[in-house]
Image: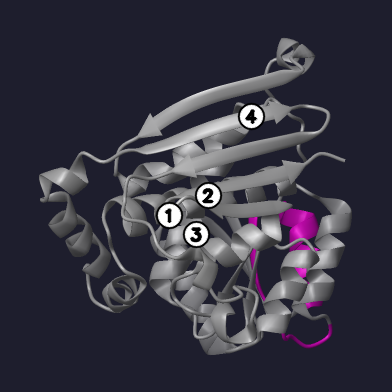
Amino acid sequence: MKVLIAEDNNTARTYLTAVVQRQGYQWFAARDGVEALELFESESPDLVITDIQMPRMDGITLLQNIREKNTDVVVIIITGEGSAESASRALHSGANNYLQKPVSDKQLLQLLRKYAIVISERDAGHELSRMVLERSLIMQMDNRVEATTRMAQYLVAQTKIDFTEKERLDLILGLDELLSNAIEHGNLGITQQEKEKALYEPEGLRLIHEQRLSDDVRARRLVTIEYHGNRKTFCEWIIRDEGDGFNWREVPNPLAPEAVYKPCGRGIFLSRMIFDYVEYRDRGNVVCVRKNLH
């Protein structure tokens, strides 16, 4: 995977390139948006990480220029602390995801690994699949959080719809977040506070997963996914876990400025941005999301 990094701060740029380099990815670094756009045109990266505030050309303008040339490349915007408006603007302008300064190496590595899987397995699909008007399927998965990205990728592929690469990547990301929530917060019963604490501890997430999976009752729980779609009108996914649920009626607005940058809760925020319809059902252990086809 080829990664382009655009960051005017020397320390931050060195840090980002070091993280990317340690994963074995090919990388290119730019000091501002103009230099980044030149590298984008000459090197054709698969993924772009760009700061939002840069001299000569800011990150949003760079993103808009990239989207005019290529809808397939993955773009991650880095925003300032507490800049909910900037994150929303970036996503509306075509970014696939966002990170808040100071960038956490764990969050960055998680996104790099997810998108590397997606990028490495792109395929055009079979011509005959375009003749299918409606599709439905039901799947189940166990509680391996590391499998959610591939499951999300498979679910989107099974729609057999010619999404733009940007749309396809966004759907994969949204489903991945919801599947992870169903496992961690649903089946394994990890609270938001417990996950936030684990994120700041070495091996914290791995350890809390192992602890919860040692409980046979939790370990045997499954996530069930239903898909229904009509290639002319909509795609709909219903994700059900076997956990205790939560009072979804009391969930605060995930688009509120104070909620955007919480270490947890990204699934709800991104779902509202990616899908046209999001509904929690039953006792909060079922979520239905829909993408309308225009």
Residue 228's disc is 4
Q: Quadrant of residue 160?
A: top right
Residue for badge 3: 111
72 to 35, vertically: above or below: above
**Left or right: 129, with 16 as reference point:** right
Measure the alpha-carbon separation of dots 3 and 2: 23 Å
Neighbour tally class for label 3: few under 14, some 14-19, many 20 plus, Cα within 10 Å: some
Neighbour tally class for label 1: few under 14, some 14-19, many 20 plus, Cα within 10 Å: few
Measure the alpha-carbon separation of dots 1 and 3: 30 Å
Residue for badge 1: 283
Q: Position of residue 143 (x, y in %)?
A: 29, 44
Q: Is residue 242 magenta?
A: no
The mark that comes first in sequence, 1 or 3, is 3
Residue 287's disc is 2
Q: Amino acid at mark 1?
A: Arg
Q: Amino acid at mark 2?
A: Val
* Residue 52 visible here: no
